Image (spheres, rainbow, N blue to C red):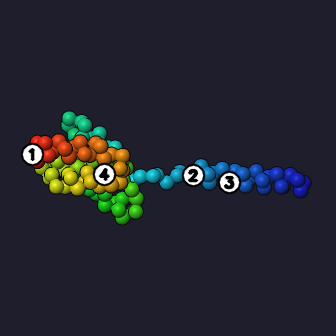
Amino acid sequence: MHLHTAIRAGASLALATLLVGCAAPKSLYSWNGYQHQVYQYLKSDGPAAEEQILALEKGVQVSASQGAQLPPGYQAHLGLLYLNTGRTNQALAAWEQEKKQFPESAPYIDYLVGNLKKNGI
């Protein structure tokens, strides 16, 4: 009887450990609807750029308040929306943030900035 109880306790402990190990891991990034916003941007009948900017800016604020990181491309996409609405300085600032957080994005961001300069913006 003693051995049977020990086996049951061991099995219960193993099951509890497995369940704790399978708990949903914390996401590396705070996505804040980013995928949805990109999808909306690509749709021809998606919401206006201003509406998308507001949604993404809210995501920036939520991430900051939670101490979470934005995913790769978030700031770059926000910069593109800023550029499309004539806010060049905000676009450049967002792109610099993207480069700062994800240095591997530098060639792409530099390409975008180079095109702006080439076009006299």
Q: What is the CA distance from the residue labelled 2 to the residue labelled 4?
A: 31 Å
Proximity of marks 2 and 1: CB atoms separated by less than 8 Å: no
Q: What secondary structure is found at the residue carrying circle 2?
A: loop
Task: Give the mark, 2 or 4, whose residue is nearer the N terminus.
Answer: 2
Q: Residue at x 19, y 44 (%)?
A: 114
Q: Quadrant of the N terminus?
A: bottom right
Q: Amino acid at mark 2?
A: Ala
Neighbourhood count class around disc 2 (C-alpha, 10 Å): few under 14, some 14–19, many 20 upward:
few
Q: Which residue is mark 1?
A: 120
Is 119 in front, or is 65?
Answer: 119
Under mark 1, the amino acid is Gly
* Residue 93: mark in rendering: none
Q: Is residue 57 left or right of residue 26?
A: left
Q: Tell me the amino acid under the disc marked 3.
A: Ala
**Spatial distance from mark 1 to mark 4, Cα to Cα?**
22 Å
Against 17, is 38 above or below?
above
Residue at 28% x, 42% y is: 108
Q: Which mark is residue 98?
A: 4
| Residue to which mark 3 is pinned | 16
